[in-house]
Image (spheres, rainbow, N blue to C red):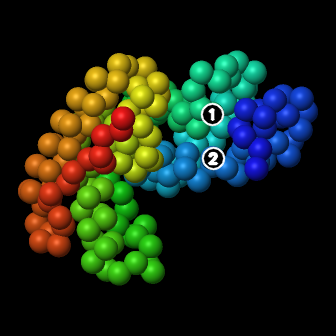
Amino acid sequence: MKDDRRLIREYLGGSDAAFEALYDRHQRALHSFAYHLLGQAQDAEDLTQTAWLQAIRSLNTFQGRSSFRTWLHAIAMNLYRHQRRDSRLKTEPLDPEAADSRQALTQAETALTLRAALATLDPEHREVLILHEVQGFKYREIATILSCPVGTVKSRVHYAMVALRAALAESSDPEVNHDVRPRPAES
């Protein structure tokens, strides 16, 4: 499997297949990230497409100081923040009808409760939790995406977890585990 930097060089050299490989590799995670931020499938699709378009336009400026994945998510985060700032997109609670019908009802209800609790968090806390806990980014990668110090990321994750525990404690769902803990710290 070719690495992202090689695929970027090949795409810039004219290979559409190289871009397709990049797209196939990163599309699902990027869309998932957008969906967790926005809570609405159509808004997530719009943000994802816009991020890919901007990435294509700026690909020749990618310097490789971070991974392509980090760079692509940073583009999406900047677009999300810009749109939120302009109040063109609103973060809304997730649609309960969107739960996967193959999941057990209890799991779906728990997931909805967790998503509803996430929606109550301040945007900066929701962003770091989604990046760290859902997308699996490391603190230094999140710092790159958000353009802030690693210490700030760690602090936001901590306070986000405190706020999430409080929001879940207020939930009326007895099946939800309120003892949420962050992923183990990286070295």
Question: Is residue 13 visible from the viewing direction of this image?
Answer: yes
Q: In which quarter of the image is the C terminus?
A: top left
Residue 50 image position (x, y, % from top left): 62, 36
Query: How many residues crowd mark 1 within 10 Å: few (<14), some (14–19), many (20+)?
Result: many
Q: Which residue lies furthest to the front in this view?
A: 187
Q: Judge left or right: residue 16 versus residue 117.
A: right
With 102 as the anchor, is 2 left or right in this view?
right
Nearer-the-camera pick, 7 or 115: 7
Q: Name the residue under label 1.
A: 68
**Spatial separation of the CA atoms under disc 1 and disc 2:** 9 Å
Does 96 appear above or below 128?
Answer: below
The residue sitting at 44% across, 79% down in the picture is: 101
Q: Percent x, y for residue 35?
A: 46, 50
Percent position of residue 75, x then y: 55, 29
What residue do we see at 70% from left, 46% from top? 23
**Label 1 vs 2, first from the N-terminus:** 2
13 relative to 108, above or below: above
Query: Does residue 146 appear in this view?
Result: no
Number of numbered discs visible in the structure rendering: 2
Neighbours of disc 2 within 10 Å: few (<14), some (14-19), many (20+): some
Q: Are marks 1 and 2 in contact (CB under 8 Å)?
A: yes
Kindly state the secondary structure of the residue where label 1 is placed.
helix
Horizontal side, residue 170 vs residue 51: left or right: left
Q: Name the residue under label 2.
A: 26
Element under disc 2: helix
Q: Which amino acid does label 1 sit on?
A: Phe
Report the amino acid beneath label 2.
His
Query: Where does residue 185 sit, x and y in percent of width and height?
Result: 30, 40
Front one among 84 and 62:
62
x 50%, y 52%: residue: 32
